[in-house]
Image (cartoon, rainbow, N blue to C red):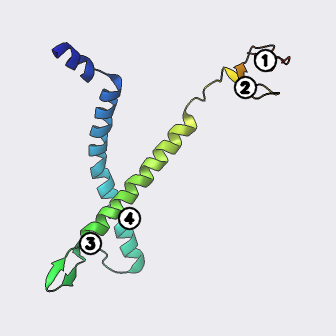
Amino acid sequence: MIREFREFVARGNLVDLAVAFILGVAFTGVVTAFSNVILSLIAAAFGADLTFDRLTATVNGTPIPYGALVTALVDFLVVAFALFLVVKAYNRFRDKPNPTTRPCPECTVQIPNQARRCPNCTSQITPVAA
């Protein structure tokens, strides 16, 4: 049982997930600071002290602090945009896979690149140069 647990923990995808989680937790501080900068720039542009954390609404004499929710939403949008940029950059620089098959020009069945004849429709095909 211990050996199986060790194999489970040592799996590559589990280790990758743990590293991603730790980086995400560390990234939280950066995002919060960046959100504060963005909110300060918005406050400077409008010439007012714009602190969402202090926003409250009163219902039947009870204050409801909805400003914390607004701040959390701004933080979420900053994180989502940052992740979007990271994934976009990753996809741009990732190596494109070299396909080993192609569609037959006659019947559109996938055939190997080196095929000279389609096994489905038996039409003659020029092989793709490697």
Other-residue count near label 2 (Cα within 10 Å), few / some / many at <14 / 14–19 / ≥20? some
Q: In the rendered image, which residue does mark 2 sit on?
A: 109
Q: In the rendered image, which residue does mark 4 sit on?
A: 38
Q: Is mark 1 in CB contact (under 8 Å) with mark 2?
A: yes
Please identify the quarter of the rendering in which residue 5 is found. top left
Say which mark, if any, is on residue 118: 1
Residue 89, how many percent across, how many down?
A: 52, 42
Which secondary structure lies at badge 4? helix
Up/down of 32 relative to 47, above or below: above
- Give the Cα separation between the discs numbered 1 and 2: 8 Å
- Give the Cα separation between the discs numbered 4 and 3: 16 Å
Residue visible at 42% across and 76% down in the picture: 45
Please state which of residues 121 and 25 is positioned toward the viewer in this rendering.
121
- Mark closer to the observer (4, 2): 2
Residue 64, how many percent across, how many down?
A: 19, 76
Q: Earlier in the sequence, mark 1 or mark 2?
A: 2
Which secondary structure lies at badge 1? loop
Q: In the rendered image, which residue does mark 3 sit on?
A: 67
Residue visible at 78% across and 17% down in the picture: 118
- Mark closer to the observer (4, 3): 3
Q: Is mark 4 in CB contact (under 8 Å) with mark 2?
A: no
